Amino acid sequence: MIRKYSLLILLVIAGLTACKDDEFGPVLQLGNAPEITSPADGSSFELLLDNAADVLTTFTWSSADFGYQAAITYEVEMDLAGNDFNDAVTLGTTSGNTLDVTVEKVNNILLAKELPGETPANVEVRVIATVSPEVDPLISAPITLTITPYTVVINYPQLQVPGSYQGWDPSNNNTVIWSVKSDDKYEGYIYFPDPNTEFKYTLGPSWDTNWGDDGADGTLEPNGANIVAANAGVYKLNVDLNALTHSFVKTDWGLIGSATPNGWDSDQDMTYDPDTGIWSITLDLVAGEIKFRANDDWAINLGDNDANKTLEYDGANIQIAEDGNYTIELILNVPKYTYKITKN
C-alpha cells in the first residue's frame, strides 16, 4: 500500500512540473551580440560631392544569437564619438547582415549635427538586434570611424502630405514634412483649416509609393486608408518609416517664462497666420527668460540650446536682455524650427 501511494505522489509531482514548464514555455538564454566586421574599426572616409549618390561603405556584421530560432531585425545607428549614442541617428534597418549607406546620406547626417564641412569628425557606429519588445536587444560593441563631410546646402529628405485640405496633390511642396537627420524619421507642422481633414503620406510627388492607416491605430500600411484629423488647426506630424508608424497632435502655441506678464505660471497665447505659417505675439516683457510651449503643457516645448535662433525640444531658456515691448515670432513651417525677437 505504501508503494502505491508513493508512486501516486511521484506521478502528481511530475504532472505539476510538466504543467509549470508548459505554462512558462522555453527559457530564453541570450547568446552573442552582433559584431561589426566591416568596415574596420578606425577606418577613415573623405566624402565628395561628386560621389554623393555612390555607396560610401557596406556595413557587415555577424548574426546575433538569442538562444532560439527567431526573425531578427537589425538597426544600424551612428552618433558622434563620446556621445554614448544619446543623439543617435538610424542609418537603416534590415533583416540581413549587411547595410549599404550612400555618401549623401552620411554627409547630410553630419551637417545636420552642425559639423563643419572639410573637417574630419569622429563618429561611432553600432548594430542593435531585436526580436520582440518583450526581449532585451543585443547590441554590438561600437566601432569608431573618421569621416570628413563636404559643405553643401542640405536638401532634407521629405514626405509629401497630400489631403483634402490641399486638393490631394502630392506634388505640392508646401505641404511636406522633413527628415532632418536623414534617418527616415519625419516631422513637420501643417495647418488643416477644416475639421475632419483627410490626408496620407507619399514618397515623392506622385501616388506610386503612399501610406495610410487602415485601422486608425498609428500603424502605416502601403495604399492604406485615409488618415483623419478631427479638428481644424496646426498639427505636429511624425512618421517613422523604419517602423511604419505615425502620430499627429493638434498644437496651439504660447509664450511662457519669467519675462512674461504671468511668469512661469501660465502661457501668453500666440496667434497663427495661415498665410505666412507663423505664430506671433506682441506684448510687454521684462528682462528675464522665455520659452515656447504647446497646449499649455510641457509635453511639447521649444528652447534654444546654443542661442543661435535654432530651436530644440526641451531646449534652454531664451534670454530677454531688457524691459520693453516685443514682437515674438515662432516659425515651424521649415525643417529646422526658428524664431524672431523684435523690440518695438
Image (tube, rainbow, N blue to C red):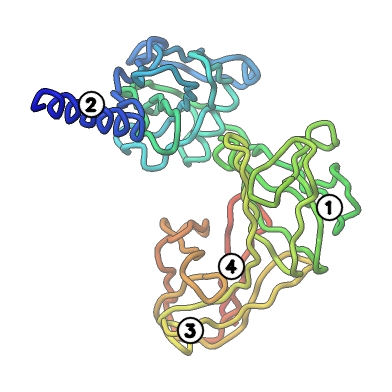
Q: Which mark is residue 57?
A: none
- Residue under the point 78% across and 68% down: 274
Pointer 2 or 3: first along the chain: 2
Residue topped by disc 1:
163
Viewer-nearest of discs 4 and 1: 1
Residue topped by disc 3:
266
Question: Is 95 left or right of 141, judged from the image as shown?
Answer: right
Residue topped by disc 2:
11
**What residue type is disc 4 on?**
Lys
* CA gap, disc 2 and disc 3: 70 Å
Pointer 4 or 3: first along the chain: 3
Helix, strand or loop at mark 3: loop
The residue nearer to you, when weighing 244 against 329, is: 244
**What residue type is disc 3 on?**
Ser
- Residue under the point 63% across and 62% down: 249
The answer to whether the residues at label 4 and label 2 have Cβ atoms under 8 Å apart is no
Does any portion of residue 54 appear in the rendered image? yes
Q: Give the image location of residue 85, x and y in percent.
A: 36, 37
**What residue type is disc 1 on?**
Gly
Q: Give the image location of residue 300, x and y in percent.
A: 51, 64
* CA gap, disc 4 and disc 1: 31 Å
Give residue 219's quadrant in the image. Answer: top right
The residue nearer to you, when weighing 26 against 206, is: 26
* CA gap, disc 2 and disc 1: 67 Å
Viewer-nearest of discs 4 and 3: 3
- The answer to whether 309 is drawn above or below residue 91 in the figure is below
Q: Give the image location of residue 184, x and y in percent.
A: 60, 36
Residue topped by disc 4:
340
